[in-house]
Amino acid sequence: MSDFSALQSALSGLMAHRRAMEVIGHNIANANTDGFTRRRVDLQPAGATAAAGVWSRNTRSGDGVNVAGVTRMREDFLDLRTRRELGTNGSVQQLSKVMDQIEALMPEPSDTGLAARLSEFWGAWDDAAAQPGDLSVRSAVLQQADALTRTLNNIASSLAELRVSLASDATTLVAQVNADSARVAELNESIVAATGAGVDAADLEDQRDLIIDRIIAQTGATTRRQDDGSVDVFLGGGTLVRGNRSEALAVVPGGPLDPPYTGTGLQKTEVRWALDGYPVDALSGRIGADLQGINSVAPRYLQQLDSVASRLVSDLNTLHRTGKGLGAGDVNLDFFDPAGVTAGTIALSASVIGQPSRIALASGSGGQLDSSLGHAIAALVDSSTGADALHRTLIGQLGVDVQSAQRRADVQSKITTQVQSDRRAVIGVSLDEELTNLVATQRAYEASARVMTAVDQMLDILISRTGVVGR
């Protein structure tokens, strides 16, 4: 190695290890930055020649060191697995929240729940049958009936409001996804341009990966990395982001609900491509859970609640028409409005509102103070096919569904936490490791500087103390 070659080697060491210290410093500075991926400087020896000649007598050992590149410590497999779990976690966590909200609308057992109202309603009939001539106890029947219908109305109204709230949440999330998709497209363009110019685009890639993770958590989208450094994002067979272009989504009403909820009269909500209006297929994540709550979960419980109301109206009116009240013309009367057969529309019949004397407690063939029909109506509480039985089935199924949703959310949360931890172990900054690397790089830099000083001293001796003959 010539002295000048030694200088070149020392200089390359200074430059390479300076670059390594810059990267280490960048890692340490971003140790707590969300989404940051640690970098590693890859060094390689700089060869003296590309190929040795046959008769070469070159004794140079090399030209020092080169920076081969700066590597982002990412693993495609961990990214793929983490993003898949993020999409699933967004879906099950949001669905669990929906189930909790529905359970809160029907708190059982409770002093204010529907079961308590049904019990008080049948008890009022039993009391009235015990004193058929007392208008005050008859009035209590109407009061309990009014409280019962209001409870059913309120639950139905709350379920409808929940659907509106979920639609609003989905709209907000879709707007965020549209903004994030546009940002990913912009970053794709910047990354491709930077990579082509030989500029480090790692920070831009970190920003893009963080945004993509958020999109996947909301939609369950998938990704594919292209050779030019851009990342395409796919959603339900469509392309959300391709290169530097993105497609927008929109939340729109989609007509009547699909069977078996078509008869509820509710309208479904869909997420469609804004460009052509086609529905987005296989949508999951948090938005997918919102749509499931709107189009399936809430309508299912509303349908079951409607069955409770319908059975209550049917059973009680059927018996009430066979009896008679205190007046001679108080016969063949409906207790509940026959037109209100859903939880949202159930109401007292105009024939008995404010007229307790018209309540039929006597059978058609009994005397004015006969109470056999009142006892028969009160006995509906024990019917295996009555409103109470349907309500118990509804609450039992709700409890199972809530517990199942919570269990899935807990399990998925643990899985997601684990895979995120695995990914952080690869991409995250370890301060202990970085400090160790910093010390090693600092010593290498100092050694390169010492080599340069030594060679400088050698050259000084060579120039100053030799070649004096002939002066």
Image (spheres, rainbow, N blue to C red):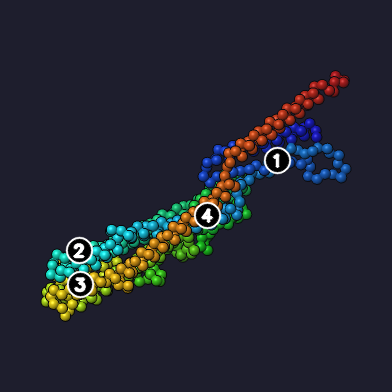
Quick one: SS at disc 1? strand
**Position in image of residue 83 (x %, y %):** 54, 55
Residue 40 picture quarter: top right
> What amino acid is at disc 1?
Asn
Q: Residues within 10 Å of mark 1 (few under 14, many from 20)?
A: some
Quarter in which the N terminus is drawn: top right
Mark 2 lies on residue: 143
> What amino acid is at disc 3?
Gly
Spatial distance from mark 1 to mark 4, Cα to Cα? 42 Å
For residue 415, the mark is 4
Nearest to the observer: residue 361 or residue 454: 361
Q: Furthest-front residue in view? A: 130
Quick one: SS at disc 3? helix
Residue 104 relative to residue 353: left or right = right
Q: Is residue 267 visible?
A: no
Instruction: Look at 27% across and 72% down and name the residue there.
Output: 380
